[in-house]
Image (cartoon, coloured by chain):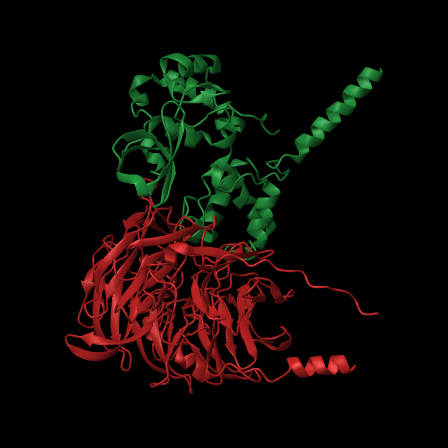
Chain colours: A green, B red
Amino acid sequence: MRKCALFVAFAVVLAAQHEDKSEKKSKNPAIGNPEAIAAGQKLFFASCAGCHGPTGDGGRGPNLRERGAWHPMDDDTMFTIVKKGVPGADMPALNRADNEIWQIVAFVRSLTAPAIEAKVPGDVEAGKQIFWSKGGCSGCHMIAGKGGFPGPDLTNIGGLRSVNEIRTSVLDPSERGVFESQPVRITFRTGGTLEGVCVDRTNYAMQVIDKAGKIHRVDMGGVEAVVFSKTSLMPGDYKTRLSRDELRDLLAYLSRQSVRPPAN
Amino acid sequence: MKLLAALILTLSPLSAQVRHEDIVQGPNHNWLTYAGDFQGKRHSPLKQITPANAGSLVAKWTNHIAGANRLEASPLVYDGVMYITNTNELIALDTRSGRIIWRYKDTRSKKDAVNRGAAILGDRVYFVTGDVHLVSLDRRTGAVAWTRQYGRVEDGLYASAAPLAVKDKIIVGVAGGDSGMRGYIAAFSADEGKELWRLYTVPAKGEPGAESWGGYIEWGGGGTWLSGTYDPALNLLYWTTGNPWPDFYGGDRKGDNLYTCSLLAIDLDTGKMKWYFQFTPHDTHDWDAQSWPVLLDTEINGKPRKVVMHPNRNGFLYTLDRATGEFLRATKMVDKLDWATGIDAMGRPILVPDKDPTPAGNYICPGVRGAANWMAPTYNPGTGLLYVMNLEQCDVYTSSAQEPEPKKNFAGGGASPKKSDPGQFFLRAYDPKTGKRVWEYPLTGKAASWSGLVSTAGGVVFFGDDDGQLVALDAKTGQHLWHYLMGENLTAAPIVYAVDGKQYVAICSATAVFNFGLFEPQKPVALPAMRTAQ
């Protein structure tokens, strides 16, 4: 009985921690409701598109589809920000009824819901096989400390990215823009070259990860020439290399990679 | 008691006041107005920091401003005291130590908005609150002399620009043009805060210019959210106006939409418009004309001219006669420009067809943030060059014919860059005689900066880059001299000043004020004996 009580106490602590999670879902019925999302999309276009772009891709204001740019943020916080604005920033308060603001929150949430919460269909086990063998993904990416360099770590990809973002990254990697993991070849003034992935750069410094996973901190003063590759190191032929079912299974596997369980 | 009296005697000799003539004179060890001088040159005559020693610049102090997350203020410095603003707040700092001397916050403001700085005149400093009040404070203590409401949040207005102190007047503007409002510029008496005149930037129904509108003229926009410049000889103010509303859909407002996206020359005494020049008639790309009108004397076609130069968001660098508004020239600033093939002899754009936003999205250059924006340019009389921060970017512009809704952030559409083609900033030096590019300095980053420039007689250009760094370039050649990472996005322009004979450069980052000077070893401070008298 004592053991049982202890177990209950432990469970309560766990539950409390779960409650504390920054991405807790609101109880508002608009969230996840297709009609509310559709209504929110219309309102978003009217009231938010001027700054965040018509599809939430950003413009004068931040991109709302890139989860990493502004998450984690729970639904209630998002509601408050839309309703009251952000003090000291350009985000204004929105003069609309609460139920309309909830519809906007539901729409923005739908743009970015993490893949782990989307219950992506497919054979997860088969997808795992593709990741670790046929697809060759693990040659460049890691999951749970295994795999290779210099692709981004995918251990938390399902918790971090939406299904659409993951799908685009797999099928059309060069669409993701030029700032993330840009392949680079550097020639130094003293001779010698370096090839790898540029993870950050300014006119004065660059950080490069090579295929062995070594970080190179480059002083641009010693660099003779830099050549960026226009295309991502990520192969662009998965559309043809894998069958439709294999892609679905791979997506199902990747979508379930999360360091936290999905929110209820 | 005697001690106290002696103390008061010692401390109270009347310190000099900031006079209009001091601002006319331009910056020296002080920096007395947003752009440093009335001409908008943002040029300091200080020469201590040069291309030869700029590499020895170091941070002297940093002060994180509690509650700040997007400082846009260009600091003022008078007599060793720095004045910066944050949302509904004005803060005085000691330039020697970086410590806060006083801070005044209007905690009852009905609107939180960014704030771009203060004005100083006499013994007063002035700033605006988000909910459109002009506030006059004692520069020594922050004591409130008066506050005057000059607009209503309920009418779609807010305020963010630094006021401009000219002669005995304080000039202010309003923002809100992206949600529908009617813009204006207003003048207050500096001493008592009496409203002296008000000039609307969009005519009322029936007034001249109203014929250039269809519906919604009462919500037409024309925000005045950036401070202006002033020519003492002509007694004219130069103030820019923002976009017509709704930003991206022009179907309900057929016509030129006067006086949006324009430069207005205004008689300081009467508030009457002497002339106007509209850069972008019937704008549908949200290309507010908010960029500094820089007043300079140069040669155009071999003849000396008093001109105003204006790097416009629409992609062109304009030169006008500043006495008459006569259009003299416009040159392309950016390579990514496809909505007009040029500017005709009357100053109107020669339009390329089908370059308006569409429901499906239309890829148009420049992007919504414009080829230039309110990031301050600088003119260096020494090099004879005008330095401008240019953004090379295109956007997919989308429109909606949905019934406009004022005051609900409705913009009639939107605009976003393509992921595969993000924007890039370039600092470009232009020759005012020709309007042509002399050199450029490409920036790295994600095209997120809003920082501006300052130049010095020492031959250095300072600016905030797109990676959160303050950078010094050789003003003649554009060669990199020095940089310092502040580690957050920059939304303000640097200034240059001196205290105790030493030159400094100061800039606000998103959350802090940074102060830089040439390296010298610190001297140890022997702590004094300190006690409380019994």
Residue B256 appearing in the image:
no
The foreground one among B319 and B466 is: B466
**Against B160, is A57 above or below?**
above
Q: Is residue B173 left or right of residue B352?
A: right
Q: Is residue A159 left or right of residue B261?
A: right
Residue A79 appearing in the image:
yes
Residue drawn at (45%, 29%) of the image: A163
Q: Quadrant of the C terminus of chain B?
A: bottom right
Give the percent coordinates (x, y) of residue B94. Answer: 57, 66
Q: In the picture, residue B107 is in which quadrant?
A: bottom right
Q: Is residue B131 left or right of residue B20?
A: right
Q: In the picture, residue A175 is in which quadrant?
A: top left
**Against A192, is B408 above or below?**
below
Q: Is residue A14 left or right of residue A206?
A: right
Give the percent coordinates (x, y) of residue A88. Answer: 54, 57
Q: Quadrant of the N terminus of chain B?
A: bottom right
